[in-house]
Image: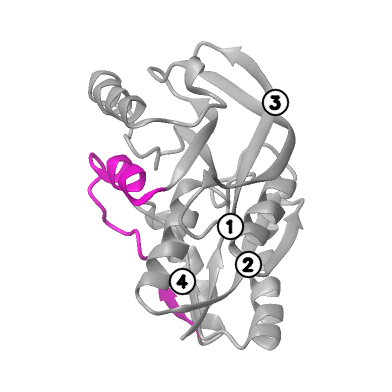
Amino acid sequence: MNIAVLFTGGKDSVFAVHKLKDEGFNVKVLISIIPSYEYSMLYHKPHPQVLMLQAYSMGIPLETATVVDPGREEVVLDEVLSRCVRRYGISGLASGAVLSRFQRERFEKIAFKHGLEAIHPNWGVDQKTYLRTLIGYGVRFIIQSITTMGLPHSMLGRVLSAEDVEKILVLSEKYGFNPSFEGGEAETVVVDAPLFKYRLRCEGSIEERSEYEAFFNIKKCCLIPKN
């Protein structure tokens, strides 16, 4: 089946691409909807250059669209899907959704409108072991934003290790946040994965807005050879 994947460049959408390929799907195109405003219930706010470099590293075409009005978030995806059905002959739409019924239901509504099958390869994974699964699979990522109590700002902007993951699991128990960040507690950027032909290097600075909110603002990113 030819399929499009809703792509943010974070751990969930990148892992979804890998799982789909492992299951025999033909990932024809990545779709990224980029809000021009700070907070969106439906989409993350990815860094456009990061998306292009990740897509290039995986050798998969990327289609992007910017949404400036929160009331048009679903309309913009509808328009992009129309274009992708024509250009790539897709018959399915996949997302990296893990737990959010809000996202899943809206993505499915738009997919079904175009006669597409909706697929969510990460749906329902065990929240306490998910980060371990990603590290074990070879997905390497940084935390780009933190919006919760309990996650140390020192984790921003650096590639997380297996030891970091264990620390996050302990902290999630202590402070009550979702250990896979599905509640929006943090957003991630994948810098390497098995499908990547090149690794991504991100440089930037940390902006701390409060004890519970901080960001790694990416100023420069590039691809570098693996090994």
Q: Which mark is residue 204?
A: 3
Which one is closest to the eye, mark 2 or mark 4?
Answer: 2
Q: CA distance from mark 3 to mark 2?
A: 26 Å
Mark positioned earlier in the residue sequence (3 or 2): 2
The answer to whether marks 2 and 1 mark residues whose Cβ atoms lie closer than 8 Å is yes
Q: Which mark is residue 142?
A: none
Q: Residue furthest top?
A: 211
Q: Position of residue 167 (x, y in %)?
A: 30, 22
Can you tell which quarter of the image residue 61 is in?
Answer: bottom right
Q: CA distance from mark 1 to mark 4?
A: 31 Å
Q: Which mark is residue 197?
A: 1
Secondary structure of the residue carrying tag 4 is helix
Which residue has dot 2 on it?
59
Amino acid residing under circle 1: Lys
Above or below, comparing residue 192 to residue 152 in the picture: below
In magenta segment, residue 128: yes
Secondary structure of the residue carrying tag 1 is loop
Mark positioned earlier in the residue sequence (3 or 4): 4
